[in-house]
């Protein structure tokens, strides 16, 4: 066992003012002004009135912008470089992380975190999740959060250990998709994901899945079979990325905004289609602006579900999980 490197929700030397999305710029300019006012305010100059005025303007602007984001803009927020990743939530919400490595077949996959921890410092849980990097070096190590077959095999190996110990499983999904390289295909990428779908469906312990950023294709589904499935307000969950969809349908990646709208990939759309159990609301301005508040919202949701699911028998848990996925989609038959 090797100690996981501790990360922070906001990398050193980078701030929201340095990394912002195009539609965030008006707010960022006001925040810079607010910072200058606070730095200038002191015993000799009282700028408290102006500071309160700017704070109200910022709050109003954030609400207007983030309450009316298009699906494509939500995809951009889901990919924000300062957005919290799996390890950020793990370090904030758990203690005593015991990370396991390797699939016992080929190697370890740094794009997939798998291990055991104490949830809220009390309950033993299994933690599985995709992990992206904060810089180029770490992103190359973690394949930008795109897991290889060995990552999915490691994940199910650890889930089986959790089942033996009677531990609930919490999965954090954040991937643009499974790694598409030749080596991954040679080692059975599609088989590894399909195997996980079958095995997770039959696990006898509660499984809670939360899409915290990108939920792309089979790469997300590989750890996405659960009794409860949630998507954060500014995350997305889709069969394909908007760019990939645009390239196939229009032969033009610039059509990604139209593809994002057509794919119905936002939490609100998915909830309306009955594909997820709920949307977890993000702090004003997105999870990258208030990581602690976002983590607390996730904890409330997980705590509630763990309490409910522990009362369900093993056989009933499996049956309900099976029926949950069988009921997805619309089917018609011809006589």
Image: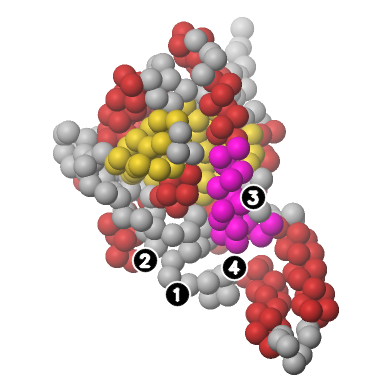
Q: Within 10 Å of the Cα at label 3, are there few (<14), some (14-19), or many (20+) other Cα atoms?
A: many
Mark 1 or mark 4: whose residue is earlier in sequence = 1
Q: Which residue is mark 2?
A: 135
The spot of residue 318 in percent (x, y) is: 47, 14
The residue that appears at 64% across and 39% down in the rendered structure is: 279
Foreground disc of the pair 3, 4: 3
- Image quadrant occupied by the C terminus: top right
Mark 3 or mark 1: whose residue is earlier in sequence = 1
- Which span of residues is magenta-colored? 284-300
Q: Which residue is mark 1?
A: 13
Marks 3 and 4 sit apart, C-alpha to C-alpha, by 17 Å
Does the magenta run of residues contain 296? Answer: yes
Mark 1 or mark 2: whose residue is earlier in sequence = 1
Marks 4 and 2 sit apart, C-alpha to C-alpha, by 18 Å
Contact (CB < 8 A) between labels 4 and 2?
Answer: no
Q: Nearer the viewer, residue 192 or 166?
A: 166
Q: Which residue is mark 3?
A: 282
Q: Is residue 247 left or right of residue 155?
A: right
Marks 3 and 1 sit apart, C-alpha to C-alpha, by 24 Å
Question: Which secondary structure, mark 2?
Answer: loop
Q: Eyeballing the image, is 88 above or below 33?
A: above
Q: Within 10 Å of the Cα at label 1, are there few (<14), some (14-19), or many (20+) other Cα atoms?
A: few
Q: Which residue is mark 4?
A: 21
Q: Is residue 104 left or right of residue 83?
A: left
Q: Eyeballing the image, is 317 above or below 160?
A: above
Q: Quadrant of residue 229?
A: top right
Question: Which secondary structure, mark 1?
Answer: loop
């Amino acid at each position: 066992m090797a100690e996981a490197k501790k990360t922070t929700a906001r990398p050193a030397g980078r701030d929201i003012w340095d990394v912002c999305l195009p539609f965030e710029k008006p707010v960022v300019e006001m925040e810079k002004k607010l910072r200058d006012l606070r730095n200038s305010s002191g015993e000799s100059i009282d700028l408290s009135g102006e500071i309160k005025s700017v704070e109200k303007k910022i709050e109003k602007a954030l609400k207007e912008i983030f309450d009316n984001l298009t699906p494509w803009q939500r995809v951009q927020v889901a990919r924000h470089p300062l957005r919290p990743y799996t390890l950020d939530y793990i370090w904030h919400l758990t203690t005593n992380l015991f990370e396991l490595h390797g699939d016992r077949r080929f190697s370890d996959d740094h794009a997939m975190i798998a291990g055991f921890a104490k949830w809220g410092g009390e309950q033993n849980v299994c933690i599985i999740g995709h992990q992206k990097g904060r810089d180029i070096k770490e992103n190359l190590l973690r394949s930008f959060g795109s897991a290889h077959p060995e990552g999915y095999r490691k994940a199910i190996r650890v889930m089986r250990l959790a089942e033996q110990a009677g531990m609930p499983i919490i999965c954090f999904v954040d991937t643009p998709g499974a790694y598409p390289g030749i080596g991954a295909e040679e080692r059975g990428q599609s088989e590894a994901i399909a195997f996980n779908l079958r095995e997770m469906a039959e696990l006898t312990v509660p499984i809670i899945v939360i899409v915290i950023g990108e939920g792309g294709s089979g790469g997300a589904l590989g750890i996405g079979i659960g009794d409860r499935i949630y998507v954060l307000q500014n995350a997305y969950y889709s069969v394909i990325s908007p760019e990939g969809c645009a390239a196939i349908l229009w032969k033009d990646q610039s059509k990604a905004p139209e593809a994002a709208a057509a794919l119905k990939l936002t939490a609100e759309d998915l909830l309306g289609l009955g594909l997820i159990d709920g949307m977890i609301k993000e702090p004003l301005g997105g999870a990258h602006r208030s990581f602690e508040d976002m983590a607390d919202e996730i904890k409330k949701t997980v705590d509630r579900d763990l309490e409910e699911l522990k009362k369900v028998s093993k056989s009933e848990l499996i049956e309900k999980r099976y029926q949950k996925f069988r009921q997805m989609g619309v089917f018609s038959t011809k006589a």
